[in-house]
Image (cartoon, rainbow, N blue to C red):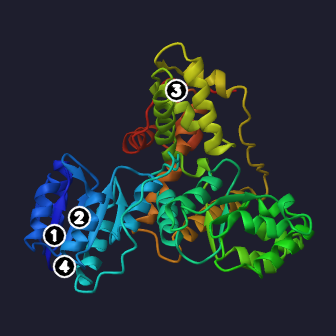
Amino acid sequence: MDGTVLVADDDRTIRTVLTQALTRAGCRVHATSSLTTLMRWVEEGKGDLVISDVVMPDGNGLEALPKIANLRPGLPVIVISAQNTIMTAVKAAEADAYDYLPKPFDLPDLMKRAARALARRNRAAPARNGTPREATSDLPLVGRTPAMQALYRLVARVMNADLAVLIVGESGTGKSLIARAIHDFSDRRSQPFVVAQASDLAGADGPASLLLRVRGGSLVFDEVADFDYESQARLVRMLDALPDPAPRIMATSQGDLAAALDSGRFRRDLYYRLAGVTLAVPGLRERVEDIPLLADHFLSRAEAAGAPRRRLSPEALALVRAYSWPGNVRQLENSVRRLVVTAAEEEIGRGEVEAVLGSQPAAEPMPLGAAGEGDRISASVARHLRRYFDLHGGALPAPGLYDRILREVEAPLIEIALDATAGNQARCADLLGINRNTLRKKITDLDIQVTRRRKLM
């Protein structure tokens, strides 16, 4: 790499790591913990690339992006942030950041992005769409796992595209929140947001009435896989005769549309009209690392609404992570709200979590027979991996995928095995078929919290 990089982050360790890595790669580096200093460097004409944190002691990195663009058109800015929400990703895209990475970031991945940015630094800056917009609601779309971050980036790319959006995922994953976020951050945010059911298409004036309500806003068809054939036909005719200006069309589905297509229960012509872009929202069990982040978010939100301050004990959090959450984020939110009310002390204990979760259904275990056992597991893994690749919208995932996938599989496997053996490491190692010393090393490497566990029945 060749060029001068301006690094702004209030974390000294991050500044040191980036300075060393960029210098070894051949760059000149200026690093600061002050947004004011960064802006002075930009005004003085220094730097071919900016790498900036969002929350700084003297300002907000995202809010500085429009000023940087005005001062130095074409100067690429890579935003790094510990605020791992959809709003951060969308605001970075709206402010025309060259790229956005959540913390903790993968250093080799960041270096590759920096190299691409420096290689393109002389290109003209893209047309601006205005300054970042504030969120209209406190959306609980929180997640730092690769699957959620890829989803956020894809949402940011399509929010103003003239394409229909199909949002698929299990019940409780947040499909309606994704649709609302696309509307609230888009250029249509001042227009109506209308959610429609199959019944809204009934009658001679059903489609016309919907279009009159939505005008040039966003029209979302909820659980479109459940529409009967007549409703599907009405929807096709409506989509073929949209007025000008046409509304943004979105649809959600927790049903398997591929199976519905194959069986003839869902019209192919309707599917292709709705699936301009498909956003797959992962289930909570596919992003276990986000569970503590979400639980903390819901606890903080309850406290902000006037509820007593609560926190999960390490043992309680381990149980929350190990639970299967068949109702996904919605079930987690409801459970946390119940714990806030029923907990006797500020720290929520394992027994209180057991009392709340013990009355709720867990996901049914996958049926494994003697024959085909490997096929069932591999097919499930293949589906999750395919969804992960699809979420990148045609781009490749960040390098280091093999180790990341192994880590995400190993950690929950060991945690569940420890739960099943009540924390007995000798029994756990025997169950897994590995040496006890190997198990101990993996527990340390994967930062698994080991406590005496009692299996939740």
Q: Secondary structure at mark 3?
A: helix
In the image, what residue occupies the spot 63% across and 50% down? 173
Q: Amino acid at mark 1?
A: Val
Question: Tag 2 or tag 4, which sits nearer the N-term?
Answer: 4
Outermost residue, left direction? 44
Q: Are marks 3 and 2 in contact (CB under 8 Å)?
A: no
Residue marked by disc 1 = 5
Q: Are marks 4 and 3 in contact (CB under 8 Å)?
A: no
- For residue 51, the mark is 2
Question: Tag 1 or tag 2, which sits nearer the N-term?
Answer: 1
Question: Tag 3 or tag 1, which sits nearer the N-term?
Answer: 1
The image quadrant where one finds the N terminus is bottom left
Q: Please identify, in this view, whether the residue under mark 1 or under mark 4 is nearer the observer.
A: 1
3D distance between C-alphas at marks 1 and 3: 44 Å
Q: Position of residue 456 (x, y in %)?
A: 65, 27
The reply, left or right, for residue 412 in relation to residue 361 is left
Residue marked by disc 3 = 316
Q: Amino acid at mark 2?
A: Ile
3D distance between C-alphas at marks 3 and 2: 38 Å
Question: Are there few (<14), some (14-19), or many (20+) residues within 10 Å of tag 3?
Answer: some
Vertical relation: 300 (above or below) 363? above
3D distance between C-alphas at marks 4 and 3: 47 Å
Question: Tag 2 or tag 3, which sits nearer the N-term?
Answer: 2
Vertical relation: 337 (above or below) 367? above
3D distance between C-alphas at marks 4 and 2: 15 Å
